[in-house]
Image (spheres, helix red, strand yellow):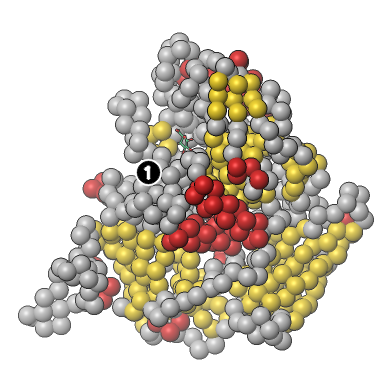
Amino acid sequence: MLSVSVVFTVSAGDFTLPLIQNVNAYETCSLNGDWNYIVDVQEEGYYDYRMKPTAWGFFRNAKPQKPEDLIEYDFDKSPTMKIPSDWNTQDERLFFYEGTVWFKKSFLAVPMKECRTLLYFGAVNYDCHVWVNGKKAGHHVGGFTAFNFDISDLLIDGENTVIVKVDNKRHAEDVPTQIFDWWNYGGITRDVKLVKVDSVYLEDYDLHLKKAANKSKVREIAFTARINTKESGHKVEVYFPELKLKQQLITDAQGQVNGTLKVAAKKLQLWSPENPKLYRVDLSVDISTISDEIGFRTIETRGKQILLNGKPIFLKGISIHNEKPNGGGRANSVEDAHTLLSWAQELGCNFVRLAHYPHHEEMVREAERMGILVWSEIPVYWTIAWTNPQTFANAKQQLTDMVARDHNRANVIIWSIANETPHSAERDKFLGGLAKYAHTLDNTRLISMAMEVTGASNYVNRLNDNMNEYVDVVSFNQYIGWYRDVNDAPKMKWEIPYNKPVIISEFGGGARYGFHGSKNQRWTEEFQENLYIENTAMLDKIDGLAGTTPWILKDFRSPRRVLPGVQDYYNRKGLVSDKGEKKKAFFVLKKWYETK
Ligand code: GCU
């Protein structure tokens, strides 16, 4: 909650609330498990035959009351699938399916006067409408960010029903837009839960270490918090038992508090990959008390260096998609996260680029526990509808929600606002606006985006991108040895005219695990191995190189990869196969990182 000015508007039939911070700290009731579903290709359950939204839609969960009643759907007789998941890997008929699927879950509840009930979704891809007991709770767009509704006044005593219409069809004005190199997994892909909160609760709070001169004896922790009502006079307390640090503050008319806690520098262990120290903190407002685990570190740049806790660091990274470690399907558990991150640590990584959209919360928190720094990104990917104000509002909302969920995570150091976007004045205006907004949202982290090499001739590669002004770290993707200049990496020179740290946010090439041959034979492990040998040597020559996140940790599903017997709808640039088998190039990168 670094920036206080996030405006929040709700309309009739929309019980959306600002995203609750640290949802798992509250008393919750999971709605994960079997949900009935109805595949509705023509949205029969939402529109009438004149394509007008109908009042008799599937959200009514209607049942025939009299023998002559005509109800042409029945959730309870419809199949079930496990939620959270994507429908593509749960029902083989839906492997390629893009369209609408309806979901229904019944649950028992007792409305409670003294507290509120939120309905929380970790993520739903892409466009979802939610009803509780036939009444509209709200609507959400964007497949990778969490959202919640206050359903207290929609609940009845006894059996309640939540119905969700999910549509993952792609449109030019969406974020991401129509084409992207990952599987368009549809559905309720992350946890669903009922959250019990007191009538006054901490909607958001932020705790971070202020930058300080080296060797300063006292460190300052900035503490800001916002309660769910714009009321003054509420007592907010923050308490670090291990540091014996406590502060009480009273909310102002905006329902906010702002304080600074002082601690002796020698008492405070700073969070770092070598020592991912987290401190338990108890936070309360009036009678509502929650706990969290917070790490303290500073991140900044100095010229072409990235400084973690005031010391230069080289970001030994890898890019990852939010896909299960074995086979396909959306990752959504701490186990999925731990397996993927353990492979990254085996590579010698201290950093991961979570591409190209916010990953599930457990991924970020598990990385924080494991001492892995994070680059988190919103899916402003390739050719977005730059001049469409709804598209900009959508991208801005996804950025807001990404920061809202993870701004207390010490390991998150870079917010990325885009990937491989074509140069134009419209693009510059769009991304410039987003970058400025990102800086206002969070001035304690670095802002970047994945740019592209803009010119190459006679083995001289140039980066010339107007966006360099808006970012703290200049990052770009390059595919020398794969999409261009095979075996020419050793000859390459670089012109990057910016006094900022450089991250190579993607490089790499494909290989089918177990396919062996000469290093000049595409798709062999030897080709990929050689590409990594040549690229890592080339990267060592780049002035200001502060890190890299090769593309990619694991082979991942993509509808754009159709080569039979090789790709079979997988992008094969992983260093690990879709079955978790390590390719030869894995060990080249591991060896290189040992030198860093
Ligand atoms: C691009 C893009 C990735 C894609 C990769 C590839 O750079 O950012 O999303 O998967 O290239 O071509 O494999």
Residue 109 position in % (x across, y down): 41, 79
Outermost residue toward the front in this view: 425
- Residue under label 1: 179
Amino acid, disc 1: Ile
Residue at the image position 55 percent from the left and 57 percent from the top: 399
The C terminus lies in quadrant: top right
Residue at the image position 90 percent from the left and 59 percent from the top: 218
Q: State the image quarter where residue 328 is shown.
A: top left
Q: Does the residue labelled 1 lie within 8 Å of ligand 1?
A: no
Q: State the image quarter where residue 12 is shown.
A: bottom left
The N terminus lies in quadrant: bottom right
Residue at the image position 44 percent from the left and 49 percent from the top: 384
Task: Name the side, left or right, on which 272 lies relative to 512.
Answer: right
Residue at the image position 49 percent from the left and 17 percent from the top: 486
Can the viewer see residue 115 in this picture?
Answer: yes
Q: State the image quarter where residue 499 is shown.
A: top right
